[in-house]
Amino acid sequence: MEKPLNDLDWSLIQSFVAVAETGSLSAASRRLDQSQPTIGRQIKRLEQTLRLDLFHRQPRGLILTEQGQAVLPAARRMASAMGEIALTAAGHDSELAGTLRITASEIVAFHHLPTIIGKMRRAVPEMAIELMPSDSSENLLFREADIAVRMYRTQQLDVITKQIGWMPMGVFATRTYLAENGSPKSPADLLNHDLVGFDRSDLILRSMREMGLPVTRDNFGVRCDDQVTYWQLIRSGCGIGFGQRPVGLADPDIVELFPDMAIPRLPVWLAAHETMRRTARVALGWDYLEQGLKPLLSRS
């Protein structure tokens, strides 16, 4: 006998959202830490319960049908609500008392994490949080940090990692700079403007060359490797530079140039030692970081 819709199993919705967002049973099984056959059975049960075909089965994965696309927004809202319930319940766990140490790049720590940490503190006031802004690789094996937010995959053994998305990048300048110097007419015209670049790091050089722009270090009139200071140089009108789109778009004095330009994105990873990953504090912090950062990221 089929289940009535008012008795719908939450785990079926959870599996549906995971498959819809990852595009395959195997990827969804890794996200949910369940077996691939279990995820497949749950999708089949949900389709039977709803009497809908939610996915097209293809050799390379699963693609949402029109019916599946119609169901997805409500399923995501349900997933979000269940996540809030889980976080609220976790917030009353006495094991959460103590200190959680988070490390992230300086730009992420400065612009993105304070809001997320504020939400954690309001939900779990008994948990102290230490934030370590650093572009170096803190050693998770020796508890220098409990959770790391990285723009690369940590290669340390016994460390659990998860890529939660891609940080979109953009080209930015101040309104004052553009008013005084004019706007570049094309990406190639950037070479005729003052550019802000890195000093010893070749990341911007490599990225611009991948976009077909033949730049050298000498093209950068101002150079700085510290990312927070680098962004302040752009904001001060020193020239045109690169930055994370969520940061640039949130600044009313900054203008994005060539928003359709194919700029290499940065992968965003969470990492924690496997023995710490499922402890109450680390699990809660991981969930808050993932939910808080995902709206800033692209998924593919």
Image: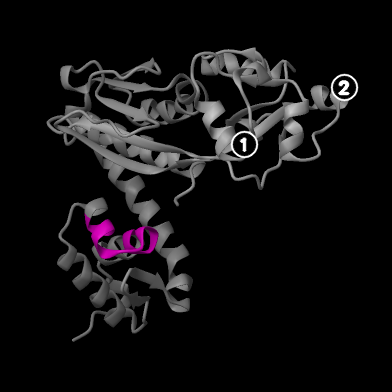
Q: Is mark 1 on a helix, strand or loop?
A: strand
82 left or right of 144? right
Residue neighbourhood size for the residue with mark 2, other residues' Cα within 10 Å, grouped as few (<14), some (14–19), many (≥20) = few
Q: Residue, x 82% and y 33% (percent of image)?
A: 183
Q: Are marks 2 and 1 in contact (CB under 8 Å)?
A: no
Q: Which of marks 2 and 1 is nearer the N terminus?
A: 1
Nearest the eye: 219 or 61: 219
Q: Nearest the camera: 84 or 259?
A: 259
Q: Can residue 254 be seen in this view?
A: no
Q: Which residue is drawn at 61% across and 13% down?
A: 223
The residue singled out by tag 1 in the image is 170
Residue drawn at the location 19% of the way across and 18% of the way down: 143
Query: Residue 178: image x %, image y %?
Result: 82, 27
Using residue 17 as the reference point, say whether residue 300 is left or right of it: right
Residue 28 in the image: above or below residue 200: below
Compared across the picture, whether 139 is left or right of 136 comes to left
Q: Residue 180 carries which label?
A: 2
Q: Of residues 6 and 244, which is closer to you in this image?
A: 244
Q: What is the magenta range?
A: 18-29
